[in-house]
Image: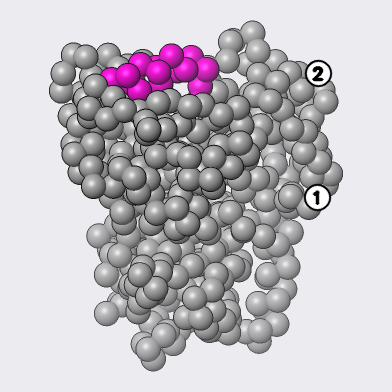
Amino acid sequence: MINDMSPDDIDGEYKEATLILYGNITRKVFFSDREIPYPDGKLIVSRTDLDGIITHVNKSFVDMSGYEEAELIGMPHSILRHPDMPSVAFKDLWDTVHGSRKWQGFVKNLRKDGAYYWVKATVIPNIRKGKIVGYTSVRRKPSRTKVDESIRLYSSLTE
Amino acid sequence: MPNIFTVSPDFTPSHLSGWYIFNTWLQRATNEPIRLTLYDNFFNQRQAIEEDVIDLIYANPYDAAMLVRDKNFQPLVKPEGGHDEAILVVNVDSQVQDVADLKTYSIVAVTDDPDVTMMGMIMLEAGDLDNNNVRFLPCMNYVLVAKQLIQGNANVGIFLAEAFDDMSNFVKKQLRVLVRGQIGIIHHSLMMGSKLQEKHDQIQRILLDMNNNDKGRKVLESLGFEQWLVVDDEEMEFMIDLMDTLVTGD
């Protein structure tokens, strides 16, 4: 079960929104206009089970998300969902990986402190003995040009 | 027929004798005939793998998927702390301060080391550069990558971190690190083919025990690390999945 965000965790001024996540779960989130730049040379890596529940995160994931590892394991990956991301992007992600294919896209992620960071994400199904047993997601630094394009595209999809 | 052992051609030259010493040690420890055969480049090594010549390999992570999925190799061990990392380097006087400053059709000096080039290109992506809009300047080794940068023939070079760090101060003073990769999850692995598979557990135990005796420790020292660590099937599959997210990333 995913909890609402806490205003006490937010750094500076913030806005609030209620998201409807996969499985019809609602979550209240608080978010600010502060962007955290993606660190050079690093990859953010996580794995989930078939339901999108986080089973593994690397240190870069922990550092960039602002959560402790223990707060992340067992949570839905949508704990990072930012209200500026259109739900159609995630539908495309799930449709793609359920079809045993690789998904790639630019994603604005929400941190525990309400700030955000952009990533270029690649998600692949983990196939063992012919069956999908989970998913691996790897995020890398996006170019500013691609981020700007994504901002324009996503704002047209969320209006 | 001896078992043919080979090492990924990107090994550091200073460890060449170490691999021969390791081969002799492994032969005695396992009581198996093993012959070290080295290849000048990845193309020739892959051809030998394709022709089922190789029985044991210290493999580049880039080749792991092919070895496991096409050739039924099994992982044995990896060196402790032996992650592969890439570095982007420019001439010390270059105006480029950030990857985003590099222009389309920049000249990128590279070796044929596949995982390092892949990791370097991922870092260049943040500057909107990819395989389709850069010009590669292929080099036989990292010393020549450094030379091309120093002579101003390339805008940026991709190095294996270990190779760059081992260069003389004289060379390093003429260069500047633009981005240092800190991926921490991609590593070489010692792997075995189907001919040796029933001895997998026995050989793995022998390798893991190497650092518990003087002779084994000295052999490991000659390879540049302190001990081997287990790589199980799932860890290898995970690394292959990771490589898959990175290899055809465009």
Gap in Å between the C-alphas at discs 1 and 2?
A: 22 Å
Q: Residue furthest bottom?
A: A24
The one nearer the camera, B245 or B152, is B245
Q: On residue B193, which mark appears?
A: none
Q: For numbered disc 2, what is the local secondary structure?
A: loop
The segment highlighted magenta reads: B11-25
Q: Position of residue B51 (x, y in %)?
A: 53, 45
Residue at image coords 24%, 21%: B28
Q: Earlier in the sequence, mark 1 or mark 2?
A: 1
Residue where numbered disc 1 is placed = B133
B171 relative to B100, above or below: above
Q: Could you tell me which chain the residue with mark 1 belongs to?
A: B
Q: Are marks 1 and 2 in contact (CB under 8 Å)?
A: no
Residue where numbered disc 2 is placed = B151
Q: Could you tell me which chain the residue with mark 2 belongs to?
A: B
A54 relative to B188, above or below: below
Q: Is residue A79 left or right of residue B53?
A: left
Q: Which amino acid, by three-letter code, is at mark 2?
A: Gln
Residue at image coords 31%, 56%: B234
Residue at image coords 41%, 67%: A126
